[in-house]
Image: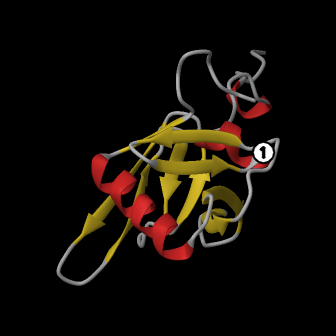
Amino acid sequence: MFGIPGKQAITLTPAAAGQIRRLMDRQGSAGLRIGVKKGGCAGMEYTMDFAETVNPMDEVVEQDGARVMIAPMAQMFLFGTEIDFQTSLLESGFKFNNPNVAEACGCGESIKFKDPVGSASDSAAPQA
């Protein structure tokens, strides 16, 4: 929907593709649907849910056996994002490296997106 021909909307690191593939096999799902919703201290949050079917309006990305569906309302916010899966001593989870994010809260769960180019906040104040 918001993509560039010949370029995937998002990319997955090998670790993320492997984890999504394992989750798809375990859950018997068609893939993982990602999106964004209002919430959190910075204003927006990522969503991730198992999907049984592909919505005709989803942007579908398939990489190394993993399938990710991007919800229609999230496509413009997620274009260019790299999804990684990281494991540390205390936690493991998906990490979104999103070039469209202006700021994130301290825990990294909540994000604020950059203003679109040419918005009212980008224009210069009139000179007197």
Q: Residue at x 66, y 63 (%)?
A: 43
Q: Amino acid at mark 1?
A: Pro
In the rendered structure, the answer to whether residue 58 lies left or right of residue 7 reads right
Image position, residue 27 (x, y; %): 55, 75
Q: Is residue 20 above or below residue 62?
A: below
Can residue 105 be spotted in the picture? no
Q: Which quarter of the rendering shows the N terminus? A: top right
Q: Is residue 70 above or below residue 29?
A: above
Q: Residue at x 28, y 64 (%)?
A: 86
Can residue 87 be spotted in the picture? yes
Foreground: 115 or 88? 88
| Furthest residue toward bottom | 90
Q: Residue at x 68, y 24 (%)?
A: 117
Image position, residue 39 (x, y; %): 69, 70
Image position, residue 68 (x, y; %): 57, 50
Mark 1: which secondary structure?
Answer: helix
Foreground: 119 or 54? 54
In the rendered structure, the answer to whether residue 48 lies left or right of residue 126 reads left
Residue under circle 1? 72
